Amino acid sequence: MNMWLKNINILQDKIVNTRSLRELTLKTFGVGVNLFAGSASKKPKVFVGLSGGVDSAVSAAILKQRGFDVTGVFIKVWQPDFLPCTWRDERRDAMRVSIALDIPFLFLDFEEEYKKGVVDKMIAEYKAGRTPNPDVLCNKEIKFGSFWKKAKEMGADYIATGHYARIEREFTISNSQFSINESISNENLNIENSMKIENFKLKIGIDSEKDQSYFLWTLAQDDLSHILFPIGNLKKEEVRRLARQYGLPVSEKKDSQGICFIGNIRMDEFLAHFIQTKPGKVLDTVGHEIGTHDGAVLYTVGERHGFTISQKGPEDKAFYVLSKDIMLNTLVVSNKKSEIISHSPTKIEIKNVNWITEPVDHALFARIRYRGEKIPVKLFLANHRLAVEFKKPVRGLSLGQSIVFYLSLNANEEKSIDESDICLGGAVMDRIIS
């Protein structure tokens, strides 16, 4: 247990326990680094990933207003030939945003990196009967991997995206001539000499409906040191309002949906082009055949669409996938609450664990799906591997998906949910113990 529990108190404010300095840090759109803007001989250079949407456009506008040297960057990735080609339209919108903001524009082609680092891995996981998170892979490999590597080579100090999440930087004061209670500004404080960044925390976005911290658990301290999330402190309606105020040409554009960068397509439709499937049997919990499906690899535990129940009455409730057997090509389903609960796990093993901020206690909150509720969990070791115990059986848990951990003062108390806005890290759910 000592491997993952450090004897530190991550709740302690390592900056200063004063309201004035803390507000100064938090008000700077969740990143704090605008303290540097304009305080040195050159402005900090930031490459902003412009997707062609409103969130990234407003991010670029905010950073320019804050005094950064902003460059807009459109990233091209692999797209399948059976889908409409939309990237040119998105690039055009990204260019229009750059023109409106009067900032330089760059075009980066990461088609090969995306195909290898995201698509191929995703398909391999589905073939193995697991359900990966393509958005997690995309963030790790492309947005905060290949993009940062190229941006750094080209002289960028930071990269920024339109994610709804926040980064809190903790400082220590080393220059005693400045009181922690006095007004701190770029004019009377030499940031580099008197302040030292000690730690970074990833926090959920202010807008709980848009929070994307679930997809960011693979980030490390080093990553957070050069990433900016300018809209993390804003709600979606505020982002729209700012887009109109800035006169951005995408202010009324609808949000994109679907697989990261690829677009709006059902996953089973996408996978059918890459994985050979055949129809199989749908079974009840005692092994009786009650329907058919199109191929077990196309389904996820907890899913209730896409298969046919031949023995279903008009008053029957929806059937849910409880498990799947790739070798036998079968699905087990049920519409009975007692059976669904009895097939829901309470303990799982996890892998690929990444701690952004290591926990000091084994009791935490966790999410097992995007926008899912935070549920109390406990960490423990099973067969020398890190494992998770849930307080109650968890319905719809799919192996291969991400489990993301959040801070809790006491994960056994319901009131702590509101205090669990720090994303500690995450892992991949690997095996059901019980």
Image (cartoon, grey):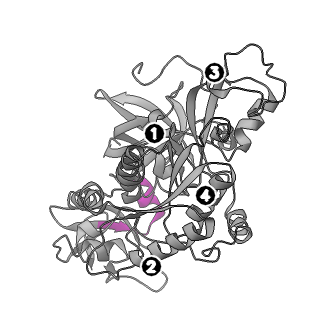
Q: Which residues are magenta?
A: 332-342
Of badges 1 and 3, nearer the viewer stands 3
Locate residue 358, reporting x and y percent: 49, 28
Q: Nearer the viewer, mark 1 or mark 2?
A: 2
The earlier-in-sequence mark between 1 and 2 is 2
298 and 74: which is toward the camera = 74
- Residue 91 lies in magenta, yes or no? no
Q: How many marks?
A: 4
Q: Earlier in the sequence, mark 4 or mark 1?
A: 4
| Disc on the earlier residue, 4 or 3 | 4
Residue contact between numbered discs 4 and 1, judged by CB atoms under 8 Å: no
Quadrant location, the N terminus: top left
Residue 142: where, in percent of width, then height?
37, 54
The residue at which mark 1 appears reads as 223
Q: Secondary structure at mark 1?
A: helix
User: Looking at the image, can residue 29 be seen?
Assistant: yes
Residue type marked 1: Asp
Which residue: 35% across, 43% down?
434
In space, the residues marked 2 and 4 are separated at their CA atoms by: 20 Å
Determine which residue is flagged by label 4: 59
**Nearer to me, 367 or 54:** 54
Per the image, the residue denoted by label 3 is 193
Judging by the rendered image, the residue that carries numbered circle 2 is 89
**Mark 4 belongs to which amino acid?**
Ser
- Counting residues from the start of the chain, the first of labels 2 and 4 encountered is 4
Callout 3 amino acid:
Asn
Q: Name the residue at 63% across, 39% down.
A: 33
Q: Secondary structure at mark 4?
A: helix
